[in-house]
Image (tube, rainbow, N blue to C red):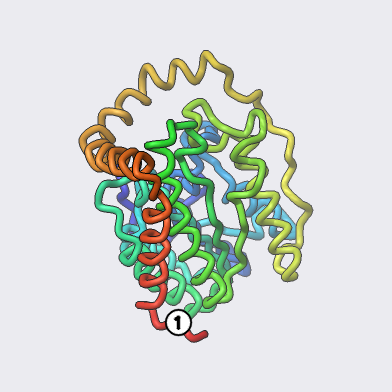
Amino acid sequence: MSTDVPLSPAGADHRGGLRAAAPRGALRFAVLGDSLSEGVGDPVPGGWRGWGALLADAVGERPGAVHVVNAARSGARSGDVAGRQLAVALACRPHLASVLVGGNDTLRGAFAIDQVAADLHLTLGALRAAGADILTACLPDPGSVLRLPWPLARPLARRMAALNSVVHALSAHHGALHLHAADRPWATSPGALSADRLHPSERGHRLLAYDFHALLVSRGLAGGPPPRLEPDRPPPGRAASTWWMATKGSRWVADRSRDLLPDLLRLALEEYRHRLRGNVAQLDLASRHATAQAIASLHLPP
């Protein structure tokens, strides 16, 4: 999947395409991240909409009061956000920015929590230094969302727990508005997942936008009413999920078979061996220790 971001000072519209410069006096909202923030699962003519666009429509007191620059791209990892996406965001001089990334890092064989922590620290620090208020979120682990068997689900759950711990610590340090989305119903409620069973549907994106709007209201940063929760379209049914798996899903599985699968099978075998020996707790302890070391390496003040 491409992680290219159009380098344009003119910014982007809700679907990531080029558009005119922000209207005079408009609040500028930079959206950084992966497919979740790109809007995958919430299609509109010409591309994706997503929770960021839905939130923007609810932040301003009038239509057009918020100019969205959506730099998020499917497949993006923390290094992509700390690189080209951050450059795009800073170029638009945002008043508000969102940083939701890391899920793709946990789904790669080369997952390194210390590198993810460093990338996020750089990104959040640069946005705060530029004067932007920041939205962050912890997310559910893909193993539980996809209902994977325990030898596969537990290693992914540890990785996501490590990521969420880092996001918690950095959100507190940088004063971000942090949403505990891992506990919110958009990941599990009926109709909230798209046909791929991994991204939010339109309803899921609306739920996420609604929760972020409540955070902004609590800080006096939103002037409009909350996003509407009722979707414009019915949620995808079983036939849509089957069609996705037979078309786009098969390509996703093939890509991950070359990248994630060898490492994940190694992790699953390790998980199974530790369970047979009755010492799975050692794996949990090692993951927590690596996470603590990653946070400590950032030298955050107590």
Q: Is residue 224 above or below residue 38?
A: below
Q: Is residue 8 visible?
A: no
Residue occupying the point 69% across, 52% down: 211
The residue at the point 55 percent across, 61 percent down is 136
* Residue 292: image location, x then y, percent: 41, 70
**Residue 139 or 16: which is nearer the viewer?**
139
x, y percent for residue 149: 43, 31
Q: Is residue 300 left or right of residue 79?
A: right
**Residue at figure coordinates x 36%, y 65% from the top left:** 290
Is 230 or 13 nearer to us in this picture? 230
The residue wearing badge 1 is: 300
User: Dot 1: what SS?
Assistant: loop
Name the outermost residue toward the right: 225
Residue 180 locus on image (x, y percent): 62, 56
Left or right: where 175 falls relative to 273 = right
Please give left or right for residue 231 compared with residue 24 in the image.
Answer: right
Residue lying at the far top of the rendered structure? 239
**Amino acid type, label 1:** Leu
Q: Is residue 285 above or below residue 125?
A: above
**Hey, which residue is sitting farthest bottom in the picture?**
301
Mark 1 Cα shell of 10 Å, populated few (<14), some (14-19), many (≥20) = few
Relative to 202, 15 lies left or right = left
- Residue 143 seen in render: yes
Q: Nearer the viewer, residue 250 or 110?
A: 110
Q: Quadrant of residue 107?
A: top left
Q: Examine the image and state in which quarter residue 83 appears.
A: bottom left
Residue 117 x/y as whole percent: 38, 67
The number of numbered badges drawn on the structure is 1
Q: Quadrant of the N terminus?
A: top left
Rendered residue at 48%/56% (across/down): 100
